[in-house]
Every structure is written in C-alpha cells, then in structure tokens.
Image: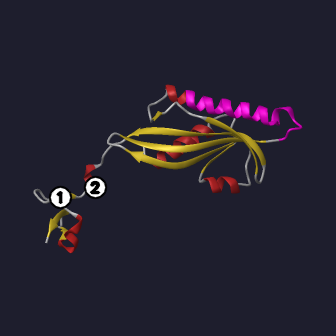
Amino acid sequence: MTLNQVKLYLKQWFASSPFINTVEVSSKSDYNDKRDVNYPFAHVEYVNNSTSSVYNVYNFVITIADIQNNSLDHRNVDEIHNDCNLLAQDFIDFHSINNEFFEMDENVMINPFDDQNTDRTAGVTFAIRLSVFRTKNNCILPKISSGIILTSDLGDDLTDDKDNNIVLN
C-alpha cells in the first residue's frame, strides 16, 4: 500500500462507522479551520514515515470529536470522552485482528481533550504506527556499470548513457 492508499483506507474505515458523520484527511491546521462539520467527526493527519528494508512505517494522528453542550446529558464532556474512546478502541481492536493490509502497533495512548475553536468540542486523539510491507520496484532504479565506484567528488565526469547506466566520461 502506498501512502495515498493508506489515507484512503483510513478515511473509508471511519466513514463506514455508523457513529461518525464526517471524516477528513488533512493537516492539523486544516482541521482547526474546518467549519462545515457534521459531528461526530474523525480527522486523520499524516505525520511522517520511516522506511526499512522490509516495511514502510506510516505515522498518523487521529482525532475523534463531537460537539459539546454541557446542558445536555449525552453531550457533556464525560460522555463524549467515553464514546470517542470506545470508537478509538474499536479501531485498535479491529486492526489487531484484521492485518491483511498492514500491521498496527497496538500500544496506543488515547488522549482526551476539550477545545473551543470554531465549535466547542471534546473527544480523543491518538497516534498510530502502521507497518506496510515494502515491495521494491527495481525497474525504475538507475543501473551502475560494473566495476565503477561512485563518489561525490566525480562532479561533471558522471553521466548516464542511453540505457540509463551511470558511466564515467
């Protein structure tokens, strides 16, 4: 899976939940500026990734939030934290069992919040690490002619031939 495929998968997973009305995959600043939200809301933010010889490990921060109104029993902060925490645990539990697309590190810290930006919201955020098997595409890598050692001080003496082999002039 590529990064874009992982983002699409996460968006579709949260969108399929009957307890989430809006899903957004974007940066944190885009999330804070979002105004047309139908709560409960899931936000997926790509943070970074690392690559090993076997895996691409993608890191995301997921926020699950609901609109807050302390005068209503089911909209107070404690109820929202509870409901959002259950959704986060559902995500973790589902992916601990279903790991056909990626392996997820199940050691996840779920952090509650209550915030007042454009809306007064509460919910949880949690960071996830997804390890995706890395397939190497050797077709697109440049070829080095045998016996040549390349160093950074070759300067203009380094070119490539018609077959994309790196050669010395």
Disc 2 from disc 1: Cα separation: 13 Å
Image position, residue 42 (x, y; %)? 65, 43
Q: Amino acid at mark 2?
A: Ile
Quadrant of the frame with the N terminus: top left
Q: Amino acid at mark 1?
A: Ile
The outermost residue toward the bottom is 156
The outermost residue toward the top is 97
Please tell me whether the stretch drawn in magenta is mainly helix, strand or loop.
helix
Nearer to us: label 2 or label 1: 1
Give yes or no for residue 88 being in the magenta stretch: yes
Residue 40 visible at all: no
Image position, residue 95 (x, y; %)? 52, 30
| In-image side of 128 versus 69 (left or right) | left
- Labels in figure, total: 2
Q: Which residues are magenta?
A: 69-93
Image position, residue 91 (x, y; %)? 58, 32
Residue 144's disc is: 1
- Residue found 26% across the figure and 52% down from its top: 139
| In-image side of 113 versus 133 (left or right) | right
Q: What residue is shown with label 2?
A: 140
Q: Give the vertical position of 37 relative to 150 (above or below).
A: above
Which structural element holds mark 1? strand
Q: Give the vertical position of 73 relative to 140 (above or below).
A: above
- Residue found 56% across the figure and 30% down from its top: 92
